[in-house]
Amino acid sequence: METAKRTLEEAIDPVVEEHTTGTAEVLETFTLTLNRKDRKDGMSKHTVVAGSRVIEGTATAHSLARVLRDGETVHEGRIISLRHFKQEVRSMKKGSECGMILHDYSGVSKGDRIVFFERVSRKPSLYEGEEDFKPT
């Protein structure tokens, strides 16, 4: 019985869940002109920095981010640089101001919301959702 259960659970595709880790509001944008040696992967010659304040949770470098404008998603990608003044940081907590650069995106503007999230993959249980099933 246990081997049959284990075999069936292995056949079920993993479930990918999104967990929001924080939100920031863009207060101002700045355009940097970078030399080739100063650019990271995903940065252009004229890179836009989103000067932001973390309003909820934590902003983390290299995390996934979604840019929202008027409640609509305008971009989804990765944070490639997170700085506090001129220092590269790993994370910023609620109430902190920081500058961030999004991978291959320069359309961020004042008033946008940036939502930080992570995608977690997990194997569902064979009995998950069983409470929704009611035989007639």
Image (spheres, rainbow, N blue to C red):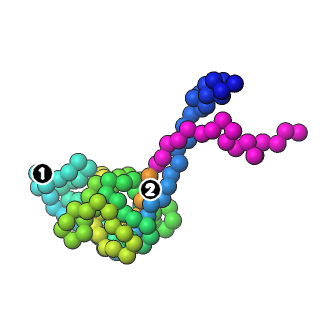
In percent of width and height, residue 8 lies at: 63, 27
Which amino acid, mark 1?
Arg
Quadrant that contains the N terminus: top right
Residue at the location (30% across, 52% down)?
A: 104
Residue 121 x, y percent position in the rendering = 50, 42
As for residue 126 lying within the magenta part, the answer is yes
* Within-10-Å neighbours for mark 2: few <14, some 14–19, many 20+: many
Q: Main secondary structure of the magenta part?
A: loop
Residue 53 sits in quarter: bottom left
Q: Name the residue that disc number 1 marks.
A: 36
Toward the right, the furthest residue is: 136
Left or right of 115, for residue 11 = right
- Up-down: is 39 above or below 30? above
Is residue 112 visible in the rendered image? The answer is no
Question: Mark 2: which amino acid?
Answer: Phe
**Residue 38 is at least partly visible in this image:** yes
Magenta segment includes 13: no
Q: Which residue is drawn at 40% across and 57% down?
A: 65
Q: Nearer the viewer, residue 10 or 34?
A: 10
Residue 48 in percent (x, y) is at 26, 62
Question: Does residue 47 appear to the left or right of 135 in the view shown?
Answer: left
- Residue 92 - label: none
Element class at badge 2 = strand
Mark 2 and mark 1 lie on one chain; the one further toward the N terminus is 1
Q: In this view, does 90 lie to the left or right of 4?
A: left
Question: Which residues, given as a range, are shown in magenta?
Answer: 119-136
Of 43 and 130, nearer the camera is: 130
Determine crowd level at label 1: few under 14, some 14-19, many 20+ residues with C-alpha closer than 10 A.
Answer: few
Q: Does dot 1 land on a helix, a strand or a loop? A: helix
Q: Would you say the residues marked 2 and 1 are in contact, meaning their CB atoms lie under 8 Å apart?
A: no
Disc number placed over residue 117 in the picture, else none:
2
